[in-house]
Image: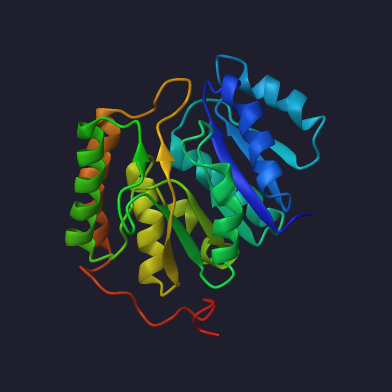
């Protein structure tokens, strides 16, 4: 078994799954892929089963209905922990995240507990986004930083690599966020627990095909849940001492 697992949630991504799995496995042969499919009406799940029958590094987790991005990742995290993967990625299926960055994040994770693929560290690297979407994303990052105190440049980003120690330490059954707020909540929990988190520059490209899953409900959830996170954790704005299982502690 390889040490790393790339989790890719899917819902109506039939046209993307074969090229993205080929690109990820070519870029990072030491990684496996887990597609988590929410019973896609376009037959993505069935097609993935056909691909997995030909590629031992490819796995598929089927869910009965569409429950949101956060629930898909939680299911994937639990699957990864049961199989003892040391490094667990989050990644989109639509090529907005460059598969060539997977080995770079994995290399960075040798000395960090969580590596955040950032569109904004050291500048802005976003391709084919309208100005309004860019301003929303940048504004969300500033909003999160002001409220929580987290110093990261791209807290809503969905391309990241966790060491298993974080996923074992966070009570995953208590994570209820789904969209942008899921990304914020997972990073916030790890940060407050004293894990070492680092930004890593990536280039983000708007999806090549298929429909965006962005909605106003996802944005609203992120806006109010940031406050809920802050109050739930006692208004803390600084992390604790390095976690005993953090690479920084050793």
Position of residue 16 measured from the top left corner of the image (x, y, whole percent): 58, 25
Which scheme is used to colour this image of the protein? rainbow
The quarter of the picture where residue 200 lies is bottom left
Does residue 33 appear in the picture of this structure? Answer: no
Q: Is residue 182 above or below residue 201?
A: above
Q: State how many labels appear.
A: 0
Position of residue 105 measured from the top left corner of the image (x, y, whole percent): 54, 58
Does residue 18 appear in the picture of this structure? Answer: yes
Q: Is residue 169 above or below residue 6?
A: below
Dividing the image into 4 quarters, which one contains the N terminus?
bottom right
Q: Residue furthest bottom?
A: 250
The quarter of the picture where residue 8 lies is top right
Residue drawn at (27%, 74%) of the image: 238
Position of residue 90 measured from the top left corner of the image (x, y, whole percent): 52, 47
170 sits to left or right of 20: left
12 sits to left or right of 28: left
Residue drawn at (47%, 78%) of the image: 243
205 sits to left or right of 36: left
Residue nearest the viewer, comparing 33 with 220: 33
Position of residue 136 measured from the top left corner of the image (x, y, whole percent): 21, 39
Dividing the image into 4 quarters, which one contains the C terminus?
bottom right
Q: Residue furthest top?
A: 42
Residue drawn at (72%, 54%) of the image: 83
């Amino acid at each position: 078994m390889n040490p790393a697992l790339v989790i890719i949630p899917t819902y109506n991504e039939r046209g993307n799954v074969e090229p993205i799995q080929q690109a990820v496995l070519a870029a990072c042969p030491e990684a496996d892929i887990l597609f988590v499919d929410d019973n896609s009406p376009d037959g993505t799940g069935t097609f993935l089963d056909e691909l997995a029958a030909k590629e031992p590094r490819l796995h598929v987790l089927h869910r009965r209905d569409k429950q949101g991005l956060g629930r898909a990742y939680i299911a994937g995290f639990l699957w990864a922990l049961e199989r003892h993967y040391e490094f667990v990625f989050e990644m989109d299926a639509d090529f907005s995240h460059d598969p060539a960055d997977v080995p770079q994040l994995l290399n960075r994770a040798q000395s960090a507990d969580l590596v955040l693929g950032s569109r904004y560290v050291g500048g802005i690297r976003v391709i084919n986004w309208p100005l309004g979407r860019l301003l929303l994303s940048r504004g969300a990052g500033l909003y999160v930083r002001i409220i929580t105190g987290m110093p990261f440049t791209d807290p809503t980003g969905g391309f990241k690599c966790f060491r298993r120690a974080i996923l074992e330490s966070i009570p995953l059954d208590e994570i209820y966020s789904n969209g942008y707020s899921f990304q914020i909540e997972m990073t916030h929990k790890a940060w407050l627990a004293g894990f070492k988190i680092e930004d890593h520059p990536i280039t983000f490209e708007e999806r090549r095909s298929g429909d965006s899953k962005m909605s106003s409900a996802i944005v609203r959830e992120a806006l109010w849940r940031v406050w809920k996170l802050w109050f739930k954790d006692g208004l803390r704005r600084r992390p604790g001492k390095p976690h005993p299982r953090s690479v920084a502690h050793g």
